[in-house]
Image (cartoon, rainbow, N blue to C red):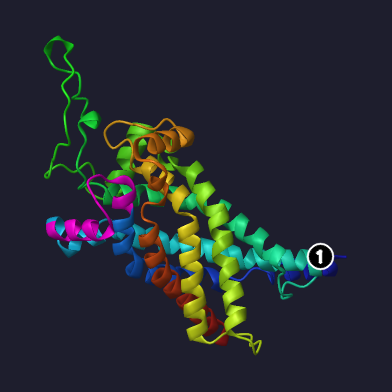
Amino acid sequence: MTKRKELAAASQLSCFHLDDFIAGWIGGASSVFVGHPLDTVKTRLQAGKGYRNTLHCVLTIYRKETVAGFFKGLSFPLASITVYNSVVFGFFSNTQRVISKYRYGDGRHPCSMLDLTLASMLTGLVSVGLGAPVDLVKIRLQMQTQTVLAENLHLAGNAPGGTNIPLGPVELPGQRLYRGPLHCISSILQREGVQGLYRGAGAMILRDVPGYTLYFIPYAFFCNLLSPDGKASPHPGSIWLAGGLAGSISWVTATPADVVKSRMQADAQRQRKYRGILHCIQSSYRTEGLQVFFRGASVNAIRGFPMSATMFLSYELSLQFFRSL
């Protein structure tokens, strides 16, 4: 009886591979360097003010902040998104093996499309637990150089006698709410508590559950399409192209939820404007129309390709290296 239990335990452990997490960490680090400049542009377009289009946003950042402006807030994503991607890819791969073990009796059995969908959705759900605070801090740091609206400074309506004076945007070039990632986290915890770190998490669930489904499934589909000979390991070029296409598809379709998430997370730098997801959607629609939910879609499509192509290629090559040892 003891021997049978030991064999069962060994069989369960065989489904868990640590190298998936390590390869995910390496892929995450490489993708951060590639995608962060465009991520900054995307965030400014979605949650900022005064940008006419993507090119105008890029030129404005460069003129006012030089090249360093595109890498604002990089240190925190570099330290955290690597861990985040490690969890995402490690969890997704290991969940596939657990599903295969449960359904087919063998963790190495190829997953069906239904299995991949379930594993992707579970990965999207789990990712929010770690990803919401990471995204929040990144966005708060990226938005620090933005024009501060008068309504966020409690200025409107404060004139003697209660006269309402319309006030336009106010530039405060020297003002910085946060000295860095740790100070940002500390400030949020002091002002809003632990729940403050998860502001926008609901919108992130709406983004990531379908988003990861439209990330991993297209990747698997394109890999199979680009490797008709059925090789176990696709060519690096096929991995790169499949990963890039999957990233663009995922990010473009996730843009509406991403806009809501970015606005809620950028909110409350001085005064909160949105009471929740529905209020953010309604307020954004009333003031800026339907097109606001597709703001940054072109940046997401462009940024999603090199980021995801680098992510998947680094992940797969790292995995092949570890398993060849």
Q: Is residue 48 magenta?
A: yes
Residue lying furthest top: 161
Q: Position of residue 127 (x, y in %)?
A: 52, 54
The residue depicted at 78 percent of the width and 68 percent of the height is 6
Could you tell me if residue 103 is visible in this image?
yes
Q: Nearer the viewer, residue 83 or 63?
A: 63
Locate the C terminus by quadrant.
Answer: bottom right
Depicted 313 relative to depicted 257: above or below? below
Could you tell me if residue 318 is visible in this image?
no
Counting labels gives 1
Which quarter of the picture shows residue 96? bottom right
Q: For this view, does 56 lie left or right of residue 217?
A: left
Q: Nearer the viewer, residue 10 or 167?
A: 167
Q: For this view, does 247 lie left or right of residue 52?
A: right
How many C-alpha atoms fall within 10 Å of the one at disc 1: few (<14), some, or many (≥20)?
few
Amino acid carrying label 1: it is Lys
The residue depicted at 42 percent of the width and 70 percent of the height is 305
Q: Which residue is mark 1?
A: 5
Tell me the SS state at disc 1.
helix
